[in-house]
Every structure is written in structure tokens, then in C-alpha cells.
Amino acid sequence: MFRRILSVSLVLVMAFTLGACVFNNQLQQESTTQLETPGPQQDVSTNTAQNQEPVSYPVALYLPNNNADGFKTKAAMTDGSAADIVDLLVQEGALPAGCAVLDFTVVSATSCAVDMNAAYGQAVTNTGTAGEYLRVGCLVNTLLMFYELDELVLTVEGDILETGHALYDQPLHFYTNF
């Protein structure tokens, strides 16, 4: 009798352990999938090919406030890519026309890297201190909040951005009103 109870208990423990391992593996795959976003090179039409609606996500766009001394937010919908989010910032006037993402990578659970085009670099460089703060802050805040990250490494055409006011050679964090 004791052996039978021991055998049944052992089988139950093994089954529970195996189930926990499978569940943990599934959670890891889901969390990895959540960090992956369609970039400019990826085709998001696979969703529609399976008769599904395109996926949209809510995003809070950080825009310069009316006094140009801080930020306000505006709700919008995005496909989840950094390129689409920057396009929305351009449409709202937070960034000038022509600004675009060249590359976006989630580096870790708390950090990302974004490489912007030369138009963005010129837009940031060819403005005063307040304008620079707002243009960089709109981009940084919107991306950090959407992807739920703590820091962002910013480059322009693969190089460190340097303006007459700042050298952006360190990770950037959430911008506040100044």
C-alpha cells in the first residue's frame, strides 16, 4: 500500500513539474513575442492574409505644450512600430516632416536604441535650447512610455548626436517639463 501511494505521488510530482516547465517556456515565448515589433523591413500584412484585422495599439504621443516649456499628451493608435510612432509625431507637428526611424532595437527589458535619419538630426541641431529639448523629449518620452522602458540610446545615421547645446552620448531617460 505504501509503495502504491509513493508511486502515485511520484507520478503526480513529475507531471506537475513537467507542466510547470512547459508553462514557463510558453510564458518566455510570449514575453519575447511582446518585445518584438514590426519594423520597416518586416511585413505586417501576414495578419491580414489570415483574414484578421490589422493590429492597432494605443499610444500616448508626447507633444510640446502651448507654452513650449513642457509636454502634453495626445492619444493615438499605432501599428506598434517605432517608424509608425515617429510618423504620428510628425503628423502632430512635434517633429518636422522628413524625420524618420532608420533602426529601432529593444536592447533589454529596460533599454532600447533608436537610430534616426539626418533630417531629425538637422531638426534638433537647427533650433534653440528649448526646441532641442522638446524635439528630443517628444521622441524619447513617446517611445519609452509605449515600449515601457527606462532608457533610450539615440543616434543619427549611426553616429552620436552632437548639437551646440548637448552631446547625446549617454542613454536618455524620461524628459520632464523644464
Image (cartoon, helix red, strand yellow):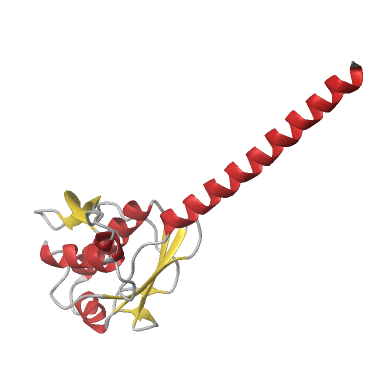
Label tally: 0
Q: Residue at 54% of width from left, 48% of height from top? A: 26
Residue 106 as seen in the image, left or right of residue 87: right
Q: Nearer the viewer, residue 155 or 146?
A: 146
Residue at the left extreme, as displayed: 66
Q: Is residue 3 above or below residue 57?
A: above
Residue 125 as seen in the image, left or right of residue 166: left
Q: Nearer the viewer, residue 20 or 113?
A: 20
Q: Name the spot of residue 5 as percent of width and height, x first.
A: 84, 20
Residue 154 as seen in the image, left or right of residue 5: left
Residue 31 as seen in the image, left or right of residue 172: right
Q: Residue at 26% of width from left, 79% of height from top? A: 121
Tell me the quadrant of the picture where the C terminus can be found. Answer: bottom left
Report if residue 150 is visible in the image: no
Q: Name the spot of residue 82 as percent of width and height, x first.
A: 30, 65
Q: Name the spot of residue 86 as percent of width and height, x first.
A: 23, 66
Q: Name the spot of residue 102 as percent of width and height, x first.
A: 32, 78
Report if residue 43 is visible in the image: yes
Q: Residue at 81% of width from left, 30% of height from top? A: 10
Tell me the quadrant of the picture where the N terminus can be found. Answer: top right
Residue 138 occupies which quadrant of the picture?
bottom left
Residue 163 occupies which quadrant of the picture?
bottom left
Residue at the top extreme, as displayed: 1
Q: Is residue 38 above or below residue 55?
A: below
